[in-house]
Amino acid sequence: MKYDAIIIGAGMSGMAAAIRLAMFDKKVLLLEKHVITGGLNSYYKRAKRDFDVGLHALTNYMEKGERRKPLATLLKQLRIPYDSLELSPQRHSKIIFPEKTLTFTNDLNELVEDIAIHFPNQIDGLTKLIAHINEFNETALDNEHVLAKDVVRRYISNEELLEMIFCPLLIYGSAWENDMDFSQFVIMFKSIYMEGFSRPKGGVRTIINLLLNKLETLGCEVRFRSEVIKIETKNEKIKGVHLKNGDFIEADLVISSMGLPETLSVVETEKELPTARTGKMTFTESILILDKFPKDFGVDTTIAFFNDRPKYLYRQPSDFYDPASAVICLPNNFVHNDFEDGWVRITNMANFNKWNEFTKDEYRAHKELVFQNACKLTKKILPSWNEEVVYKDIFSPTTIKKYTSHFGGTVYGSTDKSRDGSTAIKGLVICGTDQGFLGIVGSMLSGISMANLYGLMD
Amino acid sequence: MDNVQVRKHVLDIIADVALDDDVTTIDDAVALRDQLDLDSMDFLDIVMELKKRHKIIVPQEDYPQLASMQSCVDYLGPKFTALA
């Protein structure tokens, strides 16, 4: 049996691509290696509690009825009503550096006002930077690659402020160390500082369930436990995919969300293909369940971007993790709290190779070290915390590798992106993080755009 | 098929594409884009829905004909009639 399209990976981008194609009567097969959907953004149950993986917050917040917004585009393209997400906006987030702390909300003016207080001589430059960002078409697929810091330095002369502005944008999406492409910077700036953070009621599973319901309603075929081990081509044109169980499935279009290097590694061709680099950015995450809510300790910050150095080092740490920099998410502190416990999620940059080489005992011991540091950071953010931890869970770069199959446990994929999704093979298309849109909204928009471009427009 | 029926078919599609917008108050003479949250991707969906539901093909050079409800009815009316 031949399909119009095979989608590899039932994460956010793959599910979105499958929905688009199935919506217009394409014969689509969605393949997933694991037994559940979500990919990088997933969930699990432990100690009778629902844990989210990946998503701290949904970016690109909008109020109902706002027009020309990425989230609105996404919802319309997937035909998901806005109200079904039950979005709860953030209260405020902080960027905490040794000397200064900046606070931002979903209203850019509040950040601008705070910068005016802490960096009064930078305001003219900031205003011009924002004007430049507003005019920039960040989603054009043919933008030239320019490093964002080079562009931003033309407007912001204070390095500390520049580092503070970049900090949340880098750690919430950059595959590159210490800098990013200017188009990606604009996407991130708009999605985080201009539109902002929110949380769907019920967390990431609400989004996943909405996507799954759509797939089911549309009659899209989804196969779990179906790992693609080989992509067959002929004369640089796609033939189909081979599954681990021995099945061969034919299709004229294969949209892969496996990642660019991961996809290329299973392509079989007569000619040698260009390779893609494995990204270096991966993380540990410590999840602490508290017996009280953060607000009981007097803190209503939603997310804290913490950095204990004058410069923000966004890079693969040489040690197994970087204790001096973290994102601390307090998911109880969105406007509506839908948890029964207090939650703290702490993300640190980490080094995949170090974790990969640990023996079982070393692995356990180092996870404990990450947890101890997470407790210290929790105390820093919640100074009156009673130090009670009801339950904890820690995951590492090797956990990420295990569940996503991303080389090097990367979270933001390769440093080589395929902006238009194309590969050297006709009919083989990349979607998801390695197509270059970021975050959950970006990944779904990526799946939608690639399905539209390669599967629906003739 | 009369214009009322054509309008109803078009409205059903627009209601599904712009699912969070109120389509009951559309002014037929005014560009849809100015009344609803519709971008070029959404117009493409309208074109694809016309093909899927009614087997009507709108070539790319005719997309401007779908600008307002009135222009949709004027342009699509003969196409619906041809199918009937």
Image (cartoon, grey):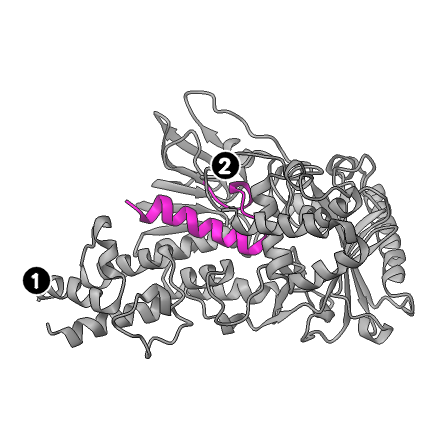
Q: Which range of residues does the magenta coloring cover?
A: A430-458
Front residue (pair A441, A111): A111
Res. A221 visible in picture: no
Mark pair 1, 2: CA separation: 44 Å
Badge 1: chain ID: B
Q: Is there any visible trace of residue A198 in the rendered image? A: yes
Q: Determine which residue is flagged by label 2.
A: A418
Q: Is residue A285 left or right of residue A422?
A: right
Q: Name which quarter of the figure residue A50 lies in.
A: bottom right
Instruction: Name the side, left or right, on which A272 lies relative to A198.
Output: left
Q: Position of residue B3 (x, y in %)?
A: 14, 73
- Locate the N terminus of chain A and report the quarter of the image it occupies: top left
Residue A119 location, x and y as percent?
Answer: 79, 52
Label 2, residues with CA under 10 Å away: few <14, some 14-19, many ≥20: some
Residue type at mark 1?
Answer: Ala
The amino acid sitting under disc 2 is: Ser
- Which residue is at a point 77% across and 48% down the rendered structure image? A161
